Each structure stands twice: as C-alpha cells, then as structure tokens.
Image (cartoon, helix red, strand yellow):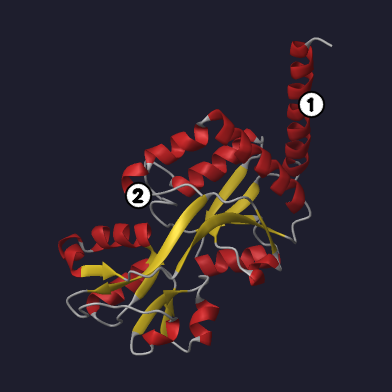
Amino acid sequence: MNPTKLLFRILVSAGAALLLLAGTVCAQGPVTLAINTWPPYIEKDSRTRGLATEIVLAALEEAGIQAKIEIVPWARALDGVRHGRFTASFPWYDTPERRTYALFTSPILHSRNVFFYRRDRHEKVNYEKLTDLHGYSIAGMLGYFYEQEFAEAELNVLYVKNSKIAFTMLQAGRVDLVPQDEIVGWREIRTLFPEDADRYATTRKALREAPGYMIISKKDPEGQRLLEAFEKGLAAIKQSGEYQAILDQYQDQGVEGP
C-alpha cells in the first residue's frame, strides 16, 4: 500500500475514535468542572482564565467536549466529585484517599507548596518533619491535601475557606504560618499587601512538590470515557505546540509544566 494512503487511513481512524469518545461523553451535555480561583493557575474576572484552566479547556476542546465551569469553594468541589454532583475538578494532588472516588488524568501542571511566614515576627522558620512545627499556629484551607497529615502531626491548625482569609490572618498576626503553593502565595501577598511583601518569607523545605491533575468522579457513568478523551486531547495539544504556548504565556510568573 502507498505509504501516504496508509498514513491517511491511520489519521482518519484515530480521528474517528476520538470523535466517537467525545460524542458519547457529550451526549449527556457539557461536563461540569468545579474549581475555585487560584491565580495564576485559575483566574476569575481576568483577561486570562489561568494556566490550569486554559490547559484543561484546550484539551477538552481538542477532544470535542464541551465544558461548564462552576466556581465553588475547594472543599465543596472535592466533595462534589466524591459524590458525583460534579463531573471533574482541577488541579489536585494525587492521594490514596482521592483514588477511591476519582479517576486521575495525566499531570497538567507542577506545584511546590511551602509555608509562608512574616520575617518581622519570626527570624527564620525551619523544619525537618511536621512535628517540628508544634510551636506555631497555622491557617490552612479546607479540602487541601494536608488536612490528614496535619491531624496526624497534631498541629495547631485553623481551617478557613480560602487563601485570602488565611493570608489576611497572617498579616494581622493571628497565625504564624500559611501553607500554599509558592507561586500562588506570592501572587496573593503582592496583591493583598504590596507594601509589606518584603516582610514575608517561605520555608526552605517544601511541604509537598508534585504534579497537579484533573480528577473525574467515579460516580459519573461516562467518567472513564471522559478520561480517555481528555488524555487524547492533552496529547494532541502537546504534539501541536499549543500546550507549550500556554505555558509560555505564564513563564514570567514562574509556573512550570509537569
């Protein structure tokens, strides 16, 4: 067979398979993505939608899948995926507990979480294990990966619904530490307290450094097909250069791909 004809048949077959997957998923209507604002990964009321949102929507669009975004608190997003009220959410760390109720895509970004503190209140905060932080008060966010780890280490944590509240408490001296993605945290501080940004610091040791994923509810009957379609769409935008183009838009903010 002519090599050109063979390549054409392969491409047509691959495209047909992707359309079949997308058609089956879309038959139920747009998939619902539950997320919360997390600049620069997820933006609201901005000229850009955020790095993570742009990657996910580009992959879904490539796969021919329509999506509807709902902005909700992180804890509600995670609980909604667990119980099937939302189709998917992003970006989340991979944990054994989340694997019990969610399917995980390939990584969509890389995240480094650290503890933020005020250098004018604490000269330096270092730790090797979480129990070294027993003398500090912490403002954490509901639904985040560290809740169980902090509980096991018996840390003094007050949980709030978003990082703006947590950093406002840190600014006011009501807590000593706030755990957050390093890029997100600095963005929040420079937005909320631009004149005090030089008074903040982060721990040298990362709380966690790992990829972030889109998670899909196992209670969604089309969840596996959505996963397969998304993976094909993600691979396609990486192959075409669109994925790298999205990353390049955010390079000045220090973001990385997986």
**Is 7 on the left or on the right of 126, as rendered?**
right
Q: Amino acid at mark 2?
A: Gly
Q: Is residue 134 above or below residue 149?
A: below
| Mark 2 touches mark 1? (CB < 8 Å) | no
Q: Callout 2: 10 Å neighbours few (<14), some, many (20+)?
A: few
Secondary structure, mark 1, is: helix
**Residue receiving disc 1:** 13
Residue at horizontal 30%, vertical 60%? 186
Q: Amino acid at mark 1?
A: Ser
Residue at horizontal 52%, vertical 43%? 55
Q: Position of residue 235 (x, y in %)?
A: 62, 38
Estimate the spatial distance between the alpha carbons at disc 2 and disc 1, rounded to whole Å.
39 Å
Residue at horizontal 39%, vertical 49%? 255
Residue projecting furthest to the front: 128
Q: Callout 1: 10 Å neighbours few (<14), some, many (20+)?
A: few
Q: Is residue 190 above or below residue 69?
A: below
Front residue of 67/101: it is 101
Q: Tell me, for residue 254, which label it has, or none.
A: 2
Secondary structure, mark 2, is: loop
